[in-house]
Amino acid sequence: MQLSGKVAVVTGASSGIGAEFSRDLVKKGAIVYGIARREDRLIALQEELNSSDNKGKFIPLVMDITREKSLSTWVEQTFSSDSGKLPDILINNAGYGRFSPVEKMAPAEFDQMMSTNMNAVFYLTRLLVPLMKQNPAVCHIVNVSSVAGLMGNPTISVYNATKFALRGFSEALFKELREDGIKVSCIFPGSISTEFFEPLGMDTHDNMMRPEDISSSVMFLLETPDNFLINEMTLRPLNPKAP
Ligand SMILES: NC(=O)c1ccc[n+]([C@@H]2O[C@H](COP(=O)([O-])OP(=O)(O)OC[C@H]3O[C@@H](n4cnc5c(N)ncnc54)[C@H](OP(=O)(O)O)[C@@H]3O)[C@@H](O)[C@H]2O)c1
């Protein structure tokens, strides 16, 4: 896909890798609808990107992706085949983790983590797929899982469950949508230096991957030729230990 002029929806655009995907897409000439809850962070990113040659290409949207009604209202108001405005790219990136032994994990936290990391991906995907099917160009959905979507580990069982679920969803969708000209990729990153670790009380360090590393890999996935799909990609620090 040639990214210039494409319309992308990126969830979790207010920080970390979602902000980096948004920067790279805008720099490549795409229009980005960046969704998150923290308005100040989205506005700061918009101002940063407006100062480049791509004024107006980052459109901030303050929304909680677990609210299906907000998503459906926005999609209805924004896209239609009549207006010719159709999405080309969806990056389901927003997510978070809370870690604890299973008996100490509150049911409400389970619900919230599953709702953010999996249910919301389903909500937004089911709203955008019909529009992508009307788009004559090849479209691409990228789901951000984690190495925690490939292997379970003590104290992260709920986060594991959300990210394993996302893998299954992605694999089924890649087979379901390929004949409609919609690519589906699922990425499985190891540790990345972002705010993800702040609420966990864990420090980031120089041996973690950088958001730029993940974003350049996702740009590579998006820019592959139309009839070429990388449906899964695992990304790891070579040596994950703190220096
Ligand atoms: N960092 C890592 O080591 C790592 C490794 C593998 C996978 N991942 C995955 O990568 C993704 C991005 O994480 P990150 O590392 O970039 O961390 P981050 O900086 O904490 O970013 C998380 C993003 O998700 C958004 N978000 C969370 N809940 C939301 C909600 N209900 N509605 C809308 N937006 C919401 C946050 O925005 P607001 O708070 O403003 O809403 C923020 O923009 C996550 O899915 C994470 O599981 C991270």
Image: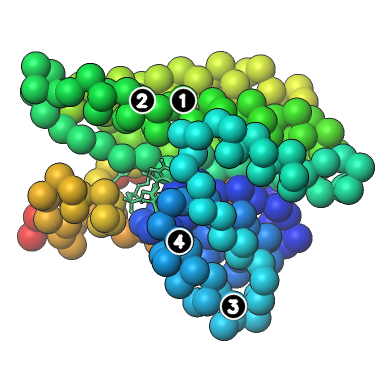
Q: Are marks 1 and 2 in contact (CB under 8 Å)?
A: yes
Is the residue 193 above or below the residue 162 in the image? below
Residue at (83%, 41%) from the top-left corner? 80
Q: Position of residue 222 (x, y in %)?
A: 61, 47
Residue annotated with mark 4: 39
Among numbered discs 1 and 3, the one appearing first in the sequence: 3
Q: Position of residue 115 (x, y in %)?
A: 40, 27
Residue annotated with mark 1: 119
Among numbered discs 2 and 3, the one appearing first in the sequence: 3
Q: Are marks 2 and 4 in contact (CB under 8 Å)?
A: no
The quadrant in which the C terminus is found is bottom left
Query: Disc 3 beta carbon < 8 A from ligand 1?
Result: no
Give, as a three-letter code, the residue at label 3: Asn
Among numbered discs 3 and 4, the one appearing first in the sequence: 4
Residue annotated with mark 2: 114
Residue annotated with mark 3: 50
Circle 4 or circle 1, nearest the eye: 4
Mark 3 surroundings within 10 Å by alpha-carbon count, few (fewer than 14), some (14 through 19), many (20 or more): some
Q: In 3D space, how far apart are the residues under numbered discs 1 and 3 (Cα atoms)?
A: 32 Å
Q: In 3D space, how far apart are the residues under numbered discs 2 and 4 (Cα atoms)?
A: 23 Å
Residue at (70%, 24%) from the top-left corner? 178
Among numbered discs 4 and 1, the one appearing first in the sequence: 4
Query: Judging from the image, what secondary structure is the residue with disc 1 in?
Result: helix
